[in-house]
């Protein structure tokens, strides 16, 4: 095991500068020219800023490769679509164009790309222009922001925030958007006018298709696309705000504690020593929707006291981030006891992990003293496990535990006692799913013997958003030939599936009604989500329409096949993580070392019960038929409690 501890302080800037200059190779003269330039004009602040920037540059880079150039026309295509008034990310022309690029050139694999290190590539003219324009921007830093020189160095001066390819942009954005800064006197007001400009006026939006693009977007690519992932939008926001003299950076959760993936957002440094967080290109107030385990802040300067060891994954000892978890949530320094069988290890460090599907994902590290682990500044209300990291593998070395909101620790351990476990979902129901269901509010079920529905009977009016699905008894006054689900103006509908039931006569057996499908608007091969998607037997597809028009989907039972309508089963657009009829599910429990299968069953209804399941531990439900989203849960008072 090798451990390297980098140590440096401000007085050692020259040593770090020399290290960066040595790494520049043939580009050293370009970097030295920047320092000499400011020395020659006697500007001490700019000389120091140049040295500071170059000293912290040695580990900064962007990716290059022919495949990046081959994907570049896609951003021109996004621009042409936007100019033609086509902004919907769901338009199939976008996905078809992307798919054609993948088919022709393959996917972009970061590991196969070259790294262009800034010390070897950045020109003196670029750095001098960046430094001069940053100092001009500093003169206009709002009074509500932190105006200290250190904050300027960290959050205004840098020419990049992540791995995006550097471009010249400061002067242009200062001239274009300086009015956004100058017409407001509070950070809230500035954020609001900023969002209005870029969201309402310029139409920046989130793009699902660009989740497939694994690289950071350049300034020019964002100007063309006017869309991107949270990461893309946050990087662009930093660039614009720094051009205006506003000290801004990116804060991020590398992995949520109760769901998959993570999140990035922006933060402005304030005069009172605090930060002002906000989601990029999102008008709503900032909210952390899921449970974080750790929150970090992107910096340009390097932490020369970080620990680098093979016992810690490399993404956890990156030297240019800061742990700001305690700025957002109460945090706790915790000691976790190690299982006896792992106490003889020679490792000095362990990792603390959160769950994702059937894996444990490391989110931080801590010291190991042979008996226990110590982890600092951990956020509560999250289930963790302590582990060792060995050759890329995670070796669980403690029982999983819940770090409660008050800092207390509850360990989970499988008991010899068993009980039955009834499951209804494999992933928690979230506010996002609730928002997806709301467009169904106001929809109605109508029946008629007139295909134009000039005369009709309303059998059902949706008054609240359904959770997962809804099965509703209705009663028609007579038999009908036509039945439809009607969506009025002002709603997109987002109906995943609708099934009508009826009887030939009151004494007959109820049956699913089948017939000729009809609907409005007519299917559009580019737009997608036609009315056929509401009756295709697939709860993962859905019918959606423009809000400016009415829409409907229904069936014509045919002349002589009129029915009494007795029941309507309907499903909103959703993640389909409730139990799906016909799918096979496997329940697993954690036995202290690994996941153990209880067995698998096919769902006949929207719930399943497994017998003889050990109590007191964590559980995990898998859909063996399809789908990937899964979460751990406990079983308390007959209910699943997800973490």
Image: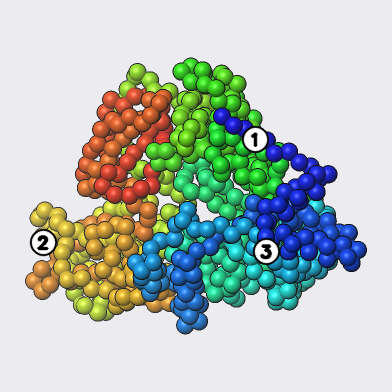
Q: Residue at x 70, y 39 (%)?
A: 6
Q: Position of residue 112 (x, y in %)?
A: 46, 56
Q: How many C-alpha atoms fall within 10 Å of the one at disc 3: few (<14), some, or many (≥20)? A: some
Corner quadrant of residue 601: top left
Density class for disc 1 (Cα within 10 Å; few <14, some 14-19, many ≥20) is few
In the picture, measured across the screen, residue 40 lies left or right of residue 180, that is: right
User: Of marks 1 and 2, which one's residue comes earlier in the chain?
Assistant: 1
| Residue position for label 2 | 504
**Where does label 3 land, which residue?**
122
Closer to the camera, 639 or 271?
Answer: 271
- Counting other residues with Cα less than 10 Å from the Cα at mark 2, is it few (<14), some (14-19), or many (20 or more)? some
Q: How is the image coloured?
A: rainbow
Q: Which residue is under mark 1?
A: 4
Label 2: state its secondary structure. Answer: loop
Q: Nearer the viewer, residue 583 or 136?
A: 136
- What label sits on residue 66 in the rendered view? none
Inspect this view and state whether residue 354 appears: no
State the CA–CA distance, disc 3 to disc 2: 78 Å
Q: Residue at x 68, y 35 (%)?
A: 5
User: Residue at position x 61%, y 44% from top?
Assistant: 318
Q: Which label sits in the foreground, 1 or 2?
A: 1
Q: Is residue 475 above or below residue 455?
A: above
Task: Work out whether mark 3 precedes mark 2 in sequence or the reverse, and give the earlier one.
Answer: 3
Disc 1 and disc 3: Cα gap in Å?
Answer: 28 Å
Where disc 1 sits, the SS reads strand
Residue 421 is situated, as x and y percent measured from the top left of the image, at: 32, 32
Residue lying farthest to the right in this orientation: 42
Query: Quadrant where the N terminus lies?
Result: top right
């Amino acid at each position: 095991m090798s451990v390297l501890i980098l140590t440096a302080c401000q007085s050692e800037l020259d040593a770090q500068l020399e290290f960066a200059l040595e790494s520049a190779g043939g580009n050293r003269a370009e970097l030295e020219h920047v320092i000499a330039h400011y020395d020659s004009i006697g500007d001490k602040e700019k000389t120091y800023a140049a040295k500071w920037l170059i000293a912290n540059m040695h580990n900064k880079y962007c990716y290059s490769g022919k495949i990046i150039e081959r994907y570049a026309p896609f951003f021109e295509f996004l621009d042409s679509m936007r100019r033609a008034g086509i902004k919907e990310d769901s338009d199939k022309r976008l996905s078809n164009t992307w798919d054609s690029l993948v088919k022709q050139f393959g996917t972009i694999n970061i590991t196969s790309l070259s790294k262009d290190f800034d010390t070897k590539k950045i020109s003196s003219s670029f750095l001098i222009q960046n430094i001069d324009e940053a100092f001009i921007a500093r003169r206009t830093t709002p009074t509500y922001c932190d105006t200290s020189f250190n904050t300027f160095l960290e959050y205004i001066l840098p020419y990049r925030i992540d791995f995006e390819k550097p471009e010249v942009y400061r002067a242009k954005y200062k001239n274009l958007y300086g009015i956004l800064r100058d017409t407001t006197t509070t950070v809230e007001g500035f954020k609001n006018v900023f969002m209005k400009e870029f969201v309402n006026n310029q139409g920046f939006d989130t793009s699902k298709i660009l989740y497939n693009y694994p690289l950071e977007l350049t300034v020019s690519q964002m100007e063309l696309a006017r869309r991107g992932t949270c990461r893309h939008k946050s990087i662009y926001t930093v660039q614009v705000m720094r051009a205006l003299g506003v000290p801004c950076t990116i804060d991020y959760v590398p992995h949520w504690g109760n769901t998959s993936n993570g999140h990035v957002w922006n933060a402005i440094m304030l005069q009172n020593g605090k930060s002002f967080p906000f989601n990029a290109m999102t008008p709503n107030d900032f909210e952390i929707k899921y449970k974080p385990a750790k929150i970090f802040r992107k910096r340009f300067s390097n932490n020369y006291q970080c620990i680098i060891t093979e016992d810690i994954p490399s993404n956890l000892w990156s030297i240019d981030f800061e742990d700001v978890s305690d700025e957002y949530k109460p945090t706790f320094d915790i000691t976790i006891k190690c299982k006896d069988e792992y106490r003889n290890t020679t490792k000095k460090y362990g990792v603390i992990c959160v769950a994702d599907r059937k894996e444990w994902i490391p989110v931080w590290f801590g010291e190991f003293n042979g008996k226990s682990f110590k982890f600092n500044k951990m956020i509560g209300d999250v289930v963790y496990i302590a582990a060792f990291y060995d050759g890329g593998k995670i070796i669980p070395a403690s029982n999983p535990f819940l770090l409660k909101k008050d800092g207390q620790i509850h360990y989970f351990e499988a008991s010899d006692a068993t009980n039955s476990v009834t499951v209804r979902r494999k992933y928690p129901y979230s506010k996002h799913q609730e928002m997806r269901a709301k467009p169904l509010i106001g929809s109605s079920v109508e029946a008629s013997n007139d295909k134009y529905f000039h005369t009709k009977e309303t059998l059902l009016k949706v008054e609240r958003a359904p959770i997962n699905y809804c099965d509703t008894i209705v009663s028609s006054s007579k038999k009908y030939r036509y039945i439809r689900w009607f969506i009025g103006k002002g709603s997109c509908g987002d109906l995943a599936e609708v099934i009508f039931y009826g009887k030939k006569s009151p004494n007959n057996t109820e049956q699913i009604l089948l017939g000729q499908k009809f609907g409005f608007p007519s299917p559009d091969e580019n737009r997608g989500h036609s009315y056929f998607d509401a009756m295709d037997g697939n709860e993962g597809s859905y019918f959606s329409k423009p809000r400016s028009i009415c829409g409907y989907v229904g069936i014509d039972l045919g002349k002589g096949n009129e029915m009494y309508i007795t029941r309507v089963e309907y499903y909103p657009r959703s993640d389909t993580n409730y139990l799906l009829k016909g799918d096979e599910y496997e329940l697993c429990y954690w036995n202290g070392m690994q996941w153990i299968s209880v067995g698998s069953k096919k769902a006949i209804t929207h719930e399943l019960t497994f017998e003889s399941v050990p109590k007191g531990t964590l559980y995990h439900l898998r859909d063996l038929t399809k789908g990937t989203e899964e979460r751990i849960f406990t079983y308390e008072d007959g209910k699943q409690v997800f973490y």
